[in-house]
Image (cartoon, grey):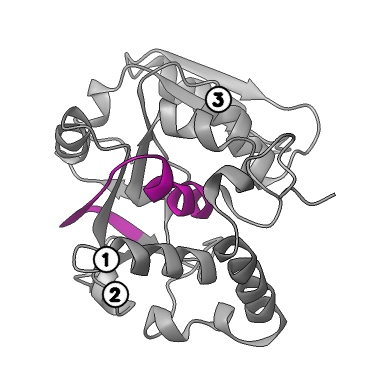
Amino acid sequence: DWSSDVCSSDLIVVGDDDSSDKTISIVKEVLSSSGIPYRIIEHKSHQGIRRNFETTFTSCSGDVIFSCDQDDVWMPDKIETFLSFFIEGYSFVYSNSTVVDADRNRIHNDYWSYYGVDFSEITVEEFRHLTLINRTISGYNMAFTKELLEAVLPFPEHFIHDDWLAICSTWFGRVAFIRKPLTEYRVHGNNTSGFGNGSIINKPEQQGEEGKKRRLLADGYYELSPDQWFGGAHMYLAS
């Protein structure tokens, strides 16, 4: 959803992963009447979520990038509030949100507390641990500097783009958390990422084969220093 705050954006970049519906025509219609400069990346073959986001993010020319990959609602002061932290030198900023249904009826007042973690109260080490073993970060609540992005490319095959940026953020810059909800997370039947149940500490990713894989990956990263993660030709990438 557009808000008055979005209109302060310098550039909107849209990455289309070879869609077969009317996505491109709808995007062009909306953006052409927005008064905001825009760029559309049209992939002619399916790239997958990681490569699509990587291409879209690297096509951004500004110093700060806001991820907007869902049909959620931004509060009018979101960009202004985030930018105040980037002006202070932070490289990764993450805010809270409320949770609403498809018609924007309130379901929960506090996305963070629902998942049992207050990011503004945890230590850097606790944040690193959470992001390594859980799918903790929601892309619509984050923004980051182009400098951070360039430091952590390419995105590895075993992490989603937003998780990877969060994992690396404390190693390559300063991280800020905004307790105030600055978005409405909209829950409906077509969500690609759902609103879970219970504490993040007990999320399904911690269980079964997926949980085992995440824990093994986390153990591997803990045993290496960040400069080893990014050595040479990015040996952490899956073949």
Relative to the observer, which residue lies in front, 113 or 147?
147
Q: Is residue 38 above or below residue 115?
A: above
Q: Is residue 188 above or below residue 225?
A: below
Q: Residue at x 58, y 25 (%)?
A: 25
Determine crowd level at label 1: few under 14, some 14-19, many 20+ residues with C-alpha closer than 10 A. few
Report the span colored magenta: 162-185
Residue 169 falls inside the magenta stretch: yes
Q: Secondary structure at mark 1?
A: loop
Quickly name the residue at label 3: 58
Q: Is residue 107 left or right of residue 136?
A: left
Q: Are marks 3 and 2 in contact (CB under 8 Å)?
A: no
Q: Are marks 2 and 1 in contact (CB under 8 Å)?
A: no
Q: Mark 3 or mark 2, which has the lower sequence index?
A: 3
Amino acid type, callout 3: Thr
x and y percentages locating residue 23 in the rendered image: 60, 34
Q: Residue at x 66, y 73 (%)?
A: 216
Task: Tell me the quarter of the image containing the N terminus.
Answer: top left
Q: Mark 2 or mark 1, which has the lower sequence index?
A: 2
Quickly name the residue at label 2: 117
Amino acid type, callout 2: Val
x and y percentages locating residue 97 in the rendered image: 25, 59
How far, Cα to Cα, is label 2 from label 1?
11 Å
Q: Residue at x 68, y 36 (%)?
A: 17
Q: Secondary structure at mark 2?
A: loop
Residue 123 badge: 1
x and y percentages locating residue 19 in the rendered image: 70, 37
Residue 70 appearing in the image: no
Q: Is residue 211 left or right of residue 2?
A: right
How far, Cα to Cα, is label 3 from label 2?
31 Å
Residue 127 falls inside the magenta stretch: no
Q: Is residue 40 above or below residue 197?
A: above
